Image (spheres, rainbow, N blue to C red):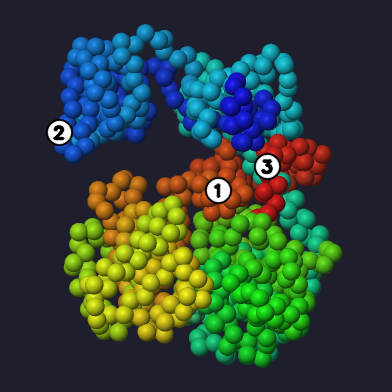
Amino acid sequence: MGKASVEKLNLLGIQEPVDLLFHLPYRYEDKTRITPIERAMAFQHVLIEGVISKSYVTQGRRPVLVVEVVDDSGVMQLKFFNFYYSQKLKMKPDLTIRAYGEMRYDLHGKSIIHPEFELSPKTKLAETLTPIYPKTEGLNQSTLQKATAQTVAWLQQGHFDLDELLPAEWLEEQDLPDLKEAITTVHAPPADADVTALMGQTHPAQQRLKIEELLAHYLAMHQLKTQAQSQQAPPLQVVENDICSLRQRLSFELTNAQKRVVSEIHQDMAREVPMQRLVQGDVGSGKTVVAALAIQVALSQGKQAVMMAPTEILAEQHFLGLQPLFKSHTVSYLTGSIKGKKRESVLAEIAGDGDVIIGTHALFQDDVQYRDLALVVIDEQHRFGVHQRLALKSKGAEGQIMPHQLIMTATPIPRTLAQIAYANLDLSVIDELPPGRKTINTVLLTNDKMPQLAERIRNALSSGEQAYWVCTLIEESEHLRAKAAEDTHAELQSWFPELSIGLVHGRLKADEKNQIMAEFKAGKTQLLVATTVIEVGVDVPNATLMVIDNAERLGLSQLHQLRGRVGRGDRQSHCVLMYQAPLSENAQTRLQTMRNSNDGFEIARQDLKLRGPGEILGTRQKGALAFRLADPENDAHLFDLAKRLAARMLKSHPELCPSLTDRWHKKGQELAKV
Ligand code: ADP
Ligand code: MG
């Protein structure tokens, strides 16, 4: 391999040949046989071979090169959206062409878009399935294929060996191949291997590797949990009177779900080991008050509690919302934009008689010293990097004494996935919205319907309601995003000269942002134009209309978060998703899902289907797991099996556990930060 390729591999954490063997193919291409066109099925990858009957370029804004291929059984079109004219010239009628790609139906029947192809094919058909590796860091597929094939050959020749870490009796019991055989099979499937099973990821070789991967994951989680449980936390007894009087200060009754979650939290806090609880609750399910009821427990014992939010807007909102609930206590507020003398006095408060401290990540800078921190609440955790969470947690640590930790997220992931991903955390779910909430009415509208929409907005706003207009321009820079929002603001202002319209974006200073939010909250502005900075947490119950322009650019969870800004009061709310037609298939599914469902968990399930768990956990949660092989949707039974095996392994073969976790989590110290 060239030096450049080796460097790229290193970036992936692949240092030695043996690491390459654990960089596993995620699918296969079957180029071992030619499929008659008639038998090709939709969405199936097929290799076909036939004679070109004609080829032409379509007229229109975007020309398409169409090559019609005929074999003994049928006709198929190969379509190229990006092509060179020289390519068109080569596609001469009567030539034989061999093509590989995913078959779909369109108006003209069977087709493959952008197939790989060979004219007048001379190469022999492949004898085995072709492994396809996750593409990474600019390495191309054939480089990875060649390097891995070479390594497998070395393994076969005995140049090095792989340690078998699963007890032989288990493999026999489950009828699974040993590691060397499994690894060889997945990288270089023998000609007689069960092709359907391999393609469907159910081959015993794959099962075995998945089980090992999951086993390693559960063992790592177990290790984290034991670590946490070996630490001590101040046991905080609940003072019922204080809790009751806090509840009386609220303007509403708790929902049953809130009551249940609060009691789970209170039980945790009374223990001598640090609470490590994740609260999942849909947008608007009322997580803040749950946090307040946890904070009260710390205060009753004369200790400090911290609440950290991912943005200044949110932190400010929590500060304003919680202060009146804790009137007899000192509530401090610290964010990055508080500087100089003011900051010094806040720091003195935190080190002294501050009781509740609310803020952003500024809360765990080195010079912030707490008097007696017993509870850390982290809101909307998916927005924080893992190392930030760790830093705050260790703030309160004195020797082995740790604060209790409560993590709240409005980005629901399906329970099965959550139990796997956060196996080291206890999970509470607020699965009920406060009574009287009306489901938000969501409509899809193409961009050219803007004028009709404008009328609707005018009507709603003139009757005293408020609206958000969200600009989604995904520009590289905050600067361009702000510019786009400014343009929209100017345009809307020219449409509605009678309205007062606010504008908030990421380029504003924190106090400017806060002021604009405050004006909107107070009803001084009727329409708020915003970038996605308003995504999380913002709570203005009088806002009943949200327009998201170019909604097709956003992912499901982000759309759901944004939409959650309306529907917070008792009036019917509306969300208008504007889009530019035509939509890609994926975008269409996303927008329809939004129209059909208001349920964050349902939306998360769809999101999981569209994007896969790796991407969901990987992007939201840098460092959290993304499985290489196992798939929480399709391998549910393996997760159960692996969990049971993990328990057995800890008992019967504890000596194997560390090697197993090391093998699969080389960079996996990361995992420890969840
Ligand atoms: P989220 O879970 O999205 O953080 P919030 O805590 O911001 O939700 O609560 C959303 C709104 O619902 C707030 O205005 C809050 O006062 C209100 N709320 C919370 N719990 C209840 C309840 N049990 N009954 C009525 N309103 C509630
Ligand atoms: Mg919230």
Q: Which amino acid lies under the numbered mark 1 shown in the image of this protein?
A: Gly
Of the two numbered discs 2 and 1 on the same chain, state the one appearing first in sequence.
2
Local packing at callout 3 (Cα closer than 10 Å; few below 14, some 14-19, many 20+) is few
Q: Amino acid at mark 2?
A: Gln
Q: Which residue is mark 3?
A: 667
Can residue 342 be seen? Answer: yes
Question: Secondary structure beneath disc 3?
Answer: loop
Residue wearing tag 1 = 618
Quick check: marks 3 and 2 in contact, CB under 8 Å? no
Percent position (x, y) of residue 74? 22, 21
Looking at the image, residue 477 sits to the left or right of residue 58; the answer is right
Residue 428 shows in the view: no
Q: Residue at x 64, y 33 (%)?
A: 10
Q: Nearer the viewer, mark 3 or mark 2?
A: 2
Q: Residue 559's image quarter?
A: bottom left
**105 up-or-down from 264: above or below:** above
Task: Tell me which residue sits at (69%, 66%) in the image.
Answer: 365
Q: Secondary structure at mark 2?
A: loop
Residue reaching furthest to the left: 59
Q: Residue at x 35, y 47 (%)?
A: 586
Residue 361 figure quarter: bottom right
As measured in the structure, the alpha-carbon distance from the residue carrying label 2 to the one carrying label 1 is 42 Å
Q: Is 613 left or right of 424, judged from the image as shown?
A: left
Residue 152, how many percent across, how many down? 63, 20
Residue furthest right in the image: 399
N-terminal label among 1 and 3: 1
Alpha-carbon span between mark 1 and mark 3: 14 Å
x, y percentage for residue 416? Answer: 55, 53
Q: Earlier in the sequence, mark 3 or mark 2?
A: 2
Q: Identify the residue under disc 2.
A: 59
User: Which residue sits at x=66%, y=61%?
Assistant: 389
